[in-house]
Amino acid sequence: MSLGKGEPMNDNGIRDCVRGLVITNNPASPDHKMNIQAAEIVLEDGGPGSLRTGAVSVTVDITVNGPNGLDTGHESPNQWYYLWLIAGHSGTAAGLLSLSPDSPALPPGYSYKAFVGAAGNFENGGNDFSPIHQIGRAVARNAVAVLNSGTATVPTAIDCSGALPKTAIKAIGDFTLNLGPGGGRGEGWLRSGPNQGTVGLAGYLNTPEYLTAPFSLPVIQPQTLYYNRSAASSAQSVTVSISGFEF
């Protein structure tokens, strides 16, 4: 593990600015460790002070507390843990896991922080990290269905908390219409809000088939999308899965 050294900046930097960020599950211990690498990042102390690091390469472990571990308490199942890089005045960098996307509890001797990503422990009963691969602010994850056979005909909220962290600003995945046993014309919509950021899907099949289209939508309300089908069409239900997101 290599740790980058940093130097205070004379003018105010913008926290979380990062170059060359890559986050993955640790190959040897993917269930409870995450690797964080960055070529350069700006951290902030909550006031006017900023710190710019050089290259950083750390592994965070949710089974321990403190630097390169969990900020406080013990692991809770089925949670998003937010990934931070932290540093003290010496400039030595470490990683930190926290339930907070805003204010992690910094260990003694550490005053600078930068938010870099999130990892959810939704595997094996909520005890293990789900596989992710993050490059910059874009994250690929295993697809997870956030809606199965939804039948609403007016814009209706979808709880995406099992697929999107609170910090996600874009959701990426697939939107499917079930045309039922007789086929026909299907119409449905996936939305960022009740009346915003709409992706429409319409088509015709004369056999019992499904219409599927990829989507990429801004997330206006944290961990929430909206959908509806047309009652006037042959679409009987809607299924939505999420396979990626961006911060």
Image (tube, rainbow, N blue to C red):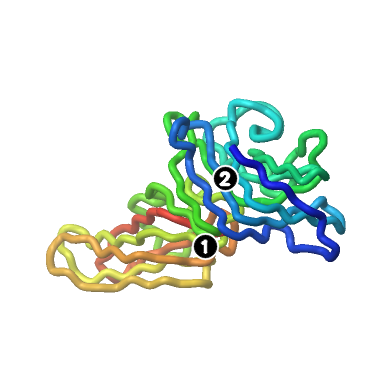
Q: Nearer the viewer, residue 5 or 85?
A: 5
Quick check: can you spot residue 98? no
The three-letter amino acid code for the residue at tag 2 is Ile
Secondary structure under the numbered disc 1 in the rendered image: strand
Q: Nearer the observer, disc 2 or disc 1?
A: 2
Quick check: can you spot residue 113? yes
Question: The N terminus appears in which quarter of the rendering?
Answer: top right
Question: The C terminus appears in which quarter of the rendering?
Answer: bottom right
Count all numbered tags in the image, as a single digit. 2
Please provide percent x and percent y for residue 16. 68, 57
Between discs 2 and 1, the one toward the N terminus: 2
Q: Nearer the viewer, residue 193 or 110?
A: 110
Q: Nearer the viewer, residue 112 or 120?
A: 112
Q: Going 23% across and 61% down the picture, which residue do you hit?
A: 210
**Alpha carbons under labels 2 and 1: distance apart:** 21 Å
**Residue at the spot of label 1:** 170
The three-letter amino acid code for the residue at tag 1 is Lys
Left/right placement of residue 34 relative to residue 92 reads: left
**Residue at the spot of label 2:** 36
Instruction: Check residue 8 in the rendering and tell me which mark sits there, or answer none.
Output: none
Q: Going 54% across and 58% down the picture, which residue do you hit?
A: 136
Q: Nearer the viewer, residue 113 or 209?
A: 113
